[in-house]
Image: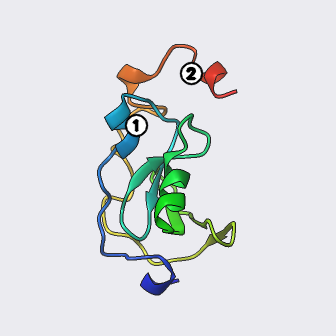
């Protein structure tokens, strides 16, 4: 895949947290990074599903896991995993950051909230 296909390997991530969860004071389970613009959003297992919302709003079709040790990419249009070039650093949230996170906003009953 390439920039024409929704991947720009030179764009850095928007930060180390889900942009919308931070703005709304929410917490997330895992983070995903838009491979086109770098937007970091929470995964579909999170309550708010901001990464998918970003795709729906922008049409940016490819995400990459923003979790340590994970490099997989997923294409929302084909609904399948895809290969792509390495993205600009950093490629995951800080190792010191909790999952779920951020720690100070994660409720004690977080597992039951996810269903």
Look at discs 1 and 2 and give the one toward the viewer: 1
Relative height, residue 38 to residue 53 (above, below): below
Query: Mark 1 = which residue?
Result: 21
Q: Residues within 10 Å of mark 1 (few under 14, many from 20)?
A: some
Task: Name the residue nearer the viewer: 3 or 98.
Answer: 3
Q: Is residue 113 left or right of residue 30?
A: right
Up-down relation of residue 85 to residue 74 (above or below): below
x and y percentages locating residue 86 in the rendered image:
42, 73
**Along the horizontal axis of the image, is 67 left or right of 80?**
left
Name the residue located 37 percent from the left edge and 32 percent from the top edge.
24
Crowding around mark 2 (Cα neighbors within 10 Å: few <14, some 14 to 19, many 20+) is: some
Q: Secondary structure at mark 2?
A: helix
Image quarter of the C terminus:
top right
Picture quadrant where residue 47 is located: top right
User: Which image quadrant for residue 73?
Assistant: bottom right
Residue beneath the point at 41% across and 71% down: 36
Q: Is residue 103 left or right of residue 76?
A: left
Label at residue 86: none
The percent coordinates of residue 104 (x first, y second) are: 36, 21
Between the C-alphas of marks 1 and 2, the distance is: 15 Å
Residue on which the image places disc 2: 110
**Residue farthest toward the front in the current orientation of the protein:** 57
- Answer above or below: position of 74 versus 41: below
Residue 74, x across and y down, in percent? 59, 65
Q: Secondary structure at mark 1?
A: helix
Residue at 54% from the left image edge and 59% from the top image edge: 56
């Amino acid at each position: 895949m390439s920039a024409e296909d929704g991947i720009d390997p030179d764009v850095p991530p928007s930060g180390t947290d889900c942009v919308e969860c931070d703005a709304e004071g929410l917490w997330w389970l895992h983070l995903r990074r838009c491979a086109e613009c770098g937007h970091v959003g929470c995964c579909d297992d999170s309550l708010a599903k901001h990464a998918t919302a970003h795709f729906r709003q922008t049409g940016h079709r490819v995400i990459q896991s923003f979790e340590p040790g994970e490099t997989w990419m997923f294409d929302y249009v084909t609904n399948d995993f895809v290969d792509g070039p390495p993205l600009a650093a950093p490629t995951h949230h800080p190792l010191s950051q909790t999952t779920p996170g951020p720690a100070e906003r994660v409720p004690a009953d977080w597992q039951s909230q996810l269903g």
